[in-house]
Image (tube, rainbow, N blue to C red):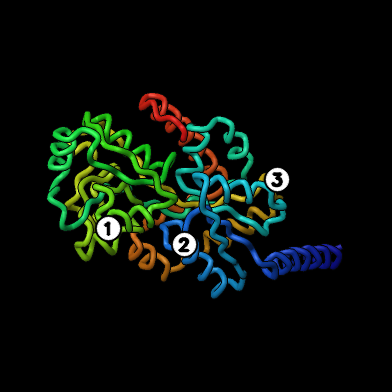
Amino acid sequence: MILRKILTAACLALVALSGASAQSSRTIRVIVPYAPGSGPDIISRLMADHIGRVQGQTMVIENRPGGGTLIGTEAAARSAPDGNTVLFVANSFVVNPAVKPETAEMARGFEPICYLAGTPMVLVVQGSSPYKTLDDLIAAARAKPGELSLGASPQSSLHVAFEMFKRSAKINMTFVPFVSTGPAINSLLGGHVTAVFADYPTVVGHLKSGTLRGLVTSSAKRVEPIKDVPTFVEAKLDKYEADIFYGMVAPAKTPPDAVNHLIGLFRTALNAPEMQPRLIEQGLFKVGMCGAPFGEFMRNAVGEYTRIIRESDMKPN
């Protein structure tokens, strides 16, 4: 009897190991619905590089920007739920259902993997701009209604931040849509827009070098690397506290064992000692919320954005 139990346990262990080996031998496609060089692209490649180099699991990044992230999201939703495809998600994943209710069912269908890291949203202007402070920008916008412009991705958390800023400051600025933050920053540097609401990783180098200046951040408290930049509340705007979240989800009906395998890969990479300084260098702050709690976080975020968007009367393009 004891021998039979030992043999049974050994067989089960071999089955588990063979299953894990089969999963790790496959290439996992990471669909990133953002442009190369963006904050989502940066952290996706950090994770994929570590997972491939240290854990032996090959991951291929597939950038599919456009449609307010819906092009990449729809591609992931149509993928086989076999654990070989994951979708990178950020705030647009929960903003889209709030702006476009017809996308809500698709978003609900994904399986939560991990909330990897968060990062601030920052309102930036050129370093050579005459707007030294947020009050300078607000005064100019009030003096010239509609003449100043702000760029950001449409129907994104950055767009929501702009609407909140515009409403609470009681100003009229023209919104200029861009497919992602990178092109918006290029337009700002070229003098084609007045300001941009950006995800911090995209502008961290510019802020350090002085080519861009931060005027306000949406974080609950000041961010240490840019501690001279006030929050919404400190700037005497309506209370608005929202960071950008960066995470991974899998297509609906991905088997639990495949989901757990993916969670293990990302959690291990995120907790690696060398990962923390690399994240901080890119303006990313580790979170590590995985599985069901991440799913609950996203459901709550949809509700909060639905309320904010309804109150700001923000309309889809």
Q: How many marks?
A: 3
**The disc labelled 3 sits on which kind of residue?**
Lys
Residue wearing tag 2:
36
Mark on residue 190? Answer: 1
Q: Residue at x 35, y 67 (%)?
A: 277
Q: Quadrant of the N terminus?
A: bottom right
Q: Quadrant of residue 183?
A: bottom left
Q: Which mark is residue 178?
A: none
Residue 198, position as x, y percentages in the image? 33, 50
Counting from the top left corner in percent of width and height, residue 141 is at 18, 37
Asked whether disc 3 touches disc 2, contact meaning CB atoms under 8 Å apart, the reply is no
Q: Is residue 212 above or below residue 218?
A: below
Disc with the residue nearer the chain's start (3 vs 1):
1
Distance of mark 1 from mark 2, alpha carbons?
A: 20 Å
Query: Of the residues shown, which amino acid type is indicated by label 1?
Result: Gly
* Foreground disc of the pair 1, 2: 1
Number of residues whose C-alpha sits closer than 10 Å to that of mark 1, classed few (under 14), some (14–19) or many (20 or more)? few
Any mark on residue 253, and which? 3
Q: Nearer the viewer, mark 3 or mark 1?
A: 1
Q: Amino acid at mark 2?
A: Pro
Inter-mark Cα distance, 3 to 1: 46 Å
Q: Position of residue 249 (x, y in %)?
A: 58, 50
